[in-house]
Amino acid sequence: MLLASVESIVENIDCDPGRRRPIVEYDVQDRDRIRREYISKGPFQPKGHVFKKSSFGNEKRSFQYKWFERHAWLEYSVDKDAAFCFWCYLFRPINDNRFGDDVFVSTGCKNWKKALAIFREHEGSVNSTHDQTRILFEGFKNQRQSVEYNLMKFDREDEVNYQIRLTASLNVTRILLKQGLAFRGSDESLESENRGNFIEILDWLREQKLEVAAVTLENAPRNNQMVCPSVQKELTNCCAVETTKVILEDIKNRNFSLLVDEARDASIKEQMALVLRYVNNDGEIVERFLALVHVTDTTAKSLKEGIDFVFAKHGLSLS
């Protein structure tokens, strides 16, 4: 699959477990990229959501937010009013069709009266399907312990050099994002007098730090220079994810208002900007830019669908 299409898929993945595509529907070569994106966001646990009550005989019951604290794998779908398993969605074996495990990946659990017992049954014992997905999940997050990492014959020096290259590229990315500057240059060849902001700032950094100069650009392996457009996009996305996490952590379960504005960009495509306004711990009113969404048109329906998508992506709730 082309890089552009993979990036488009990653940008538009739906975090609500009741609506997202099964992992098996993605191309095999793209699945780990999709998994990394989901893991960076964490399980879908909508903050401040008012859970719908359902009738169980003469009683009315609903999902409880405190269950998230007891079960790290637990997710809740606003769309289906059902509970799902984050670990099993990401790593459950394709050929494992046992009903109890399949429910937490496909249809979701809705029996709130017996929810805790059903959750325990899903977790099972050691070597259960759920336990195996936990091991795969933890191994995927910690590449040092994964089989893939252990098969890579990097020695200590190679690892240190890689960390220096990655840190240098990340620092350049942070500078450009903070200043709102373009990354690429019109001519990035070795003969160019101006190779674009990213490489020029990296060159300046190399002049200041000999350890950076020793392992970057021409002194780095050709397939591991950490300066290509795809790496720049990944680093930019990582910065965006971390910044969004800080904003959402600051909001926590507080009430907030939503500011929405729309306009056309240079390519005459309609786009919608979303800003959150809330009161922080210091009693100050703050506004934080959350997302820019391309919409098909500016009708109320299209804007509402765009807002729902962003809220689902970041675990927010209209309620």
Image (tube, rainbow, N blue to C red):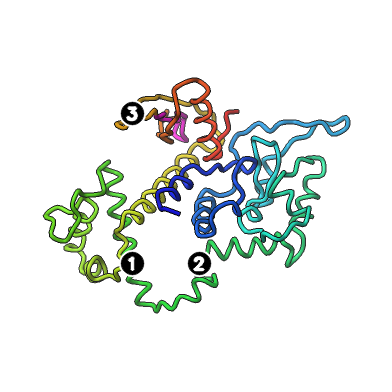
Number of residues whose C-alpha sits closer than 10 Å to that of mark 2, classed few (under 14), some (14–19) or many (20 or more): few
Q: Quadrant of residue 67?
A: top right
Q: Which mark is residue 143?
A: 2
Q: Which segment did they paint magenta?
A: 271-283
Location of the N terminus by quadrant is bottom left
Number of residues whose C-alpha sits closer than 10 Å to that of mark 1, classed few (under 14), some (14–19) or many (20 or more): some
Location of the C terminus by quadrant is top right
**Between disc 3 and disc 1, whose residue precedes?**
1
Q: Does the stretch in magenta take in 191?
A: no
Magenta-drawn stretch, dominant element (helix, strand or loop)? strand
Question: The residue under label 3 is which amino acid type?
Answer: Ile
Q: How many marks?
A: 3
Distance (Cα) linking label 1 and label 2: 18 Å
Q: Which mark is residue 268?
A: 3
SS category of the residue bearing label 2: loop
Number of residues whose C-alpha sits closer than 10 Å to that of mark 3, classed few (under 14), some (14–19) or many (20 or more): few
